[in-house]
Amino acid sequence: MLRFLGARAFQAVLVAFVVTSVAFLAIHLAPGDPFSIGPGDPPELAEAREAMRRTYGLDRPLWIQYPAMVGNLARGNFGVSYSHARPVSSVMASVIPRTLLLMGPALLIGVLLGVAIGTWQGVRVGRFSDRATSALTLALVSLPEFLLALMLGTVFALRLGWFPATGMRDARAVAGSWLGSIPDVAWHAALPCATLVIAIAAAVARYQRAAAAEAMAEDFVRAARARGASTRDIVFRHVLRRTTPVVLTVIGLLLPLLVGGAALVEVVFNWPGAGSALLGAVNGRDYPLVIGLVLIGSVAVSAGSALADFGALMANPAQRTGS
């Protein structure tokens, strides 16, 4: 077990290093920088921008900037955001909880809904209801998150007016207490969270259906039926326990897609989370903020995947014993 945890920790560090290095090269090789001098700028502004480039070390070659960045990140120093004029860690501390506010409930509700739908399908394999729901889940899995977000926003926000189209809070609720703003935040989060729930539930249902159908065909299910056990007892006592490792593994596979999907959904609904901050940092050439958000994202994905694999390992005694 210790070897497993050590290997996954090393893998997480390696992934974070590679992703961060690629992001560093990509943003620095793109044309321009945060303090680029335009052809029509007055000499005073050009001098000020050149001074800012020297202050942040952007006038140095990349082979000097890169080791400095790696050293700072190793010490936990993410630098200062150019666009926000404050430490990157402070910016991330304000935007990451907003993203988790969407991802957390969406992951919980989506997994539970997907398991319920997939199990229901697995018990009814081959029936019309199974074929119809399978076609629907396949269509939803194939639909990009941003397109699904646009569809939900167009129907329920713009056409019906049931939910806000953008933002996190109503301007009138900002001045109130945080406790009083909870319903307003939940109202604004309904559509972006629903988008992620639908995407997660559809993906989980596809895997859960196959696992449940396989479990229903096992000898222990036939034996339980011979003893007079009801379908409900078989599902809750045997099938769900048998399919738990599959669900945990699927969660690990979904985490990278969930992180990317949440970023796109935030942009569509103008939700002020890490995804919107990353897009603004890329457009504004805010190098430290881009690196910080990319690093945190890669670590979160690696950690979540490791936890999912660990849960699947614990749920399967045969894998733990190596038999």
Image (cartoon, rainbow, N blue to C red):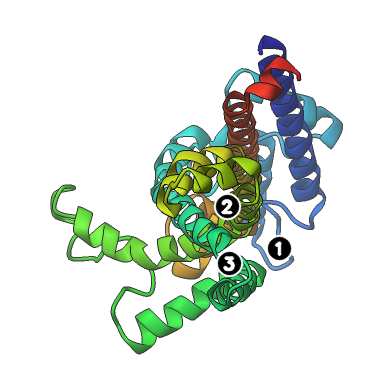
Q: Is residue 39 left or right of residue 153?
A: right
Report whether residue 48 is seen.
no
Between 268 and 75, the one lying in front of the other is 268
Badge 1: residue crowd in 10 Å (few <14, some 14–19, many ≥20): few
Residue 49 image offset from top left, x and y in percent: 64, 49
Please name the amino acid that badge 1 sits on: Gly
Secondary structure at numbered mark 3: helix
Query: On the image, numbered disc 3 is attached to which residue?
Result: 145
- Amino acid type assigned to the residue bearing label 3 in the image: Glu
- Residue denoted by label 2: 258
First in residue order: circle 2 vs circle 1: 1
Examine the rendered structure and indicate whether residue 175 appears above or below residue 288: below
Residue positioned 28% across, 79% down in the render: 162
Q: Nearer the viewer, mark 2 or mark 1?
A: 2
C-alpha separation, residue under disc 2 versus residue under disc 3: 9 Å
Q: Which mark is residue 309?
A: none
Label 1 element class:
loop
- Residue position marked by numbered label 1 in the rendering: 38
Distance CA(mark 2)–CA(mark 1):
39 Å
Residue 313, percent from left and from top: 64, 26
Label 2 sits on what residue type?
Leu
